[in-house]
Image: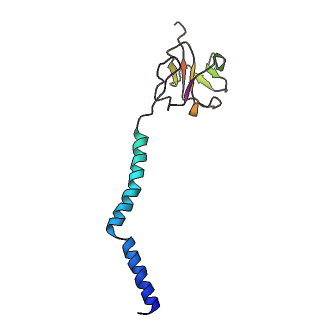
């Protein structure tokens, strides 16, 4: 056998080893497993966390780090709705308004970023109505 023929033979043999059916199945499993784990974790309900007073923020508003007790100066009641310190106006009829279970306002913003212009929810204390 000449050198080129020998080299081709070795490459074919190596290629054949790489393409064995069991190796193909194993590589598919290795690709599918992480994808299925990721998809499964995306389907899990978001876990909420607690307000300082001990009650639980709604999981639809909070992914564990989004909600925080707002300083009283951060929320002003206007005739159109709640005006936040970032300039965001949340109308009184907005579905994002939730009842606070203490006497404080609580804001839920992406990652708990107090400077975010978008709120997931605003928890509003009862006003004796």
Residue at point 46%, 90% (across, down): 3
Q: Position of residue 119 (x, y in %)?
A: 57, 29
Identify which residue is drawn at 43% across, 89% down. 5
74 or 15, nearer to the observer? 15
Front-lying residue, 52 or 125? 52
Tell me the residue at 34%/70% (across/down).
Answer: 20
Location of residue 85 (image quadrant): top right
Determine the main secondary structure of the stretch shown in magenta: loop
Picture coordinates of residue 84 (x, y %)?
A: 64, 23
Near-viewer residue (127 or 66)? 66
Looking at the image, which residue sits at the far left? 22
Which residue is the extreme one toward the bottom?
2
Q: How many marks?
A: 0
Residue 77 visible in the displayed image: no
From this view, report whether residue 34 is shown above or below residue 58.
Answer: below
Check residue 58 for magenta coloring.
yes
Residue 43 is situated, as x and y percent measured from the top left of the image, at 40, 40
Q: Quadrant of residue 13?
A: bottom left
Residue at 41% of width from left, 34% of height from top? Answer: 45
Residue 31, relative to residue 22: is it above or below?
above
Give coordinates of residue 64: x percent, y percent: 50, 31
In which quadrant will I find the N terminus? Answer: bottom left
Magenta run includes residue 57:
yes
Which residues are drawn in magenta? 49-68
Q: What colour scheme was applied to this rendering of the protein?
A: rainbow
Instruction: Locate residue 73 relative to residue 107 in the image: left or right.
Output: right
Question: Observer-nearest residue: 73 or 13?
Answer: 13
Q: Is residue 67 visible?
A: yes
């Amino acid at each position: 056998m000449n050198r080129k023929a020998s080299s081709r033979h070795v490459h074919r043999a190596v290629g054949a080893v790489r393409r064995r059916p069991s190796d193909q199945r194993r590589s598919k499993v290795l690709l599918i497993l992480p994808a299925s784990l990721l998809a499964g974790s995306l389907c899990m309900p978001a876990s909420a966390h607690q307000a300082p007073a001990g009650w639980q923020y709604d999981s639809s508003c909070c992914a564990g780090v989004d909600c925080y007790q707002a300083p009283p100066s951060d929320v002003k009641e206007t005739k159109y709705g709640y005006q936040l310190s970032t300039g965001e106006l949340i109308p009184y009829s907005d579905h994002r308004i939730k009842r606070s279970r203490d006497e404080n306002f609580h804001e839920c913003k992406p990652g708990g970023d107090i400077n975010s212009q978008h709120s997931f929810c605003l928890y509003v204390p009862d006003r004796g109505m």
